[in-house]
Amino acid sequence: MLKFTEKIFGWCFKLLMKLDFNETLAAYTSLVVNIIILGFISYLVYMVSRFFLVTIMAIVAKKTKTKFDDLLVSNETAKYISHLIPLIYIYKSVPVILDDFTSWEAIFSRLVAVYIVVLTLWVINSILKAIRDHLKTKSEYSDKPIDSYVQVIMILLWILGITIIVAKIFDVDPNTLFKTIGAVSAIIILIFRDSILGFVASVQVSVNDMIRIGDWITMDKFGADGDVIEINLSTVKVRNFDHTTTTIPTYSLISDSFRNWRGMISSDGRRIKRHISIKTSSIKFLKEEELEAFKKIHLLKNYIEKKEKDINTHNKTHNIDKSLAINGRNLTNLGLFRKYLTAYLENYPGLNKDMLLMVRHLQPTDKGIPIEIYAFSKDKRWLNYEYIMSDIFDHVIASVKYFDLEVFEMPSGKNGFSEA
């Protein structure tokens, strides 16, 4: 290989010397010619390796049953390797081309070596990503933190790679460099603890896409509730909705809990989840004459008529004694109220009907029975969202009395009780 390379890049200088060129001029002229030849050969090697690695691998991946080679293609492993092959050839050729330019040879050899190290790390990273994606398709690994394992491996490899790069640039033995770093690591960690933690946190925040500039986040521990305006190595700045600014240590984003509202903003609706408490004493079975009055409510008329037929058929079939309301099947005012609220929400224009919508009981408490509305507004903007939710609950609270129900309120002086 070396003799072949010397023949390719040595003929020009010899030819020029035979033609009685000045030695210096011959050296520089042959250098320019050799660089052109090297560029042409490297490009040719790149095109051939790209064809065989990228094109053929893509064809093979489509024909094989395994998905791992498809993941290698999607993660561009072959593309990085096809860049690496001509680069290795250039690294081997530089000493031959720059044999008469020793100072240049040292600089270019180091630069090419650094690029080879970086490309090698990219190749390894793409392979690890393919392995990660492949393992995620396996049920036995579905609950394992595979992303974390890959991140730890890549952090260690980048540390190793950076050490090799520094050793190459400054022409230092890597073993000596590792020993020196080990000796001063305790002092470095002590002095730069916050910076190191911030750096690690920044990498994790970026890799995991935890927050972005413009995200609305809530972090109660630091009193933050607003939009992220800046992310740097040590801090994250949040402009709160009251126009104050909160500074959060970057490391706190991975050590503490916070809420990112990006998912809600990018979704099809913003959740409404609120309840009112109904007095238990106001809940009752409904008599036939009371049902006639409820039929005047437009949203309930068809429902009541249908349920009346079903209930009467059931009670007659089973010879139910209706002298007591508790016997057999009956409608309650609370049940009708829930049905009314469901129908009202289904007809409310501000809600997304393609998302979950329901009215439900919560666990009874000493304050009555909570009736919760769970739905999603179409408009996610805060001001409009609050208007929609308030508009719904204005109607809900005003509707309670039409069903002979009462909303629970703490006793006050106006109700005949002395205030605490």
Image (spheres, grey):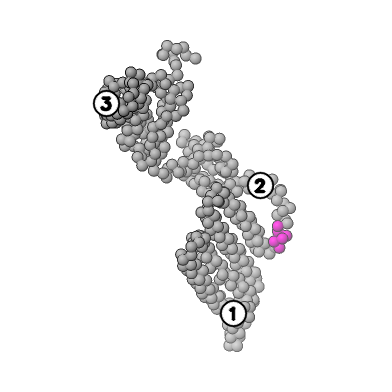
Residue at horizontal 42 percent and vertical 21 percent from the top = 280
Left or right: where 346 falls relative to 229: left
| Residue 377 spot, x, y in % from top left | 37, 38
Select label 3 or label 1 by which is in front. 3
Would you name the residue on which mark 3 appears? Answer: 295
Residue at horizontal 63 percent and vertical 71 percent from the top = 105
Under mark 3, the amino acid is Lys
Mark 2 or mark 1, earlier in chain: 1
Query: Crowdedness of circle 2 by 10 Å Cα count: few (<14), some, many (20+)?
Result: few
Residue at horizontal 54 percent and vertical 43 percent from the top = 236
Under mark 1, the amino acid is Phe
Query: Crowdedness of circle 3 by 10 Å Cα count: few (<14), some, many (20+)?
Result: some
Under mark 2, the amino acid is Phe
Disc number for residue 9: 1
The quarter of the picture where residue 381 lies is: top left
Q: Alpha carbon of mark 2 to alpha carbon of mark 3: how far?
A: 74 Å
Does the residue at mark 2 contact the one at mark 3 (Cβ under 8 Å)?
Answer: no
Residue 34 part of the magenta segment = no
Left or right: where 364 falls relative to 25: left
First to last magenta residue range: 173-178
Q: Alpha carbon of mark 2 to alpha carbon of mark 1: how far?
A: 50 Å
Would you name the residue on which mark 2 appears? Answer: 192
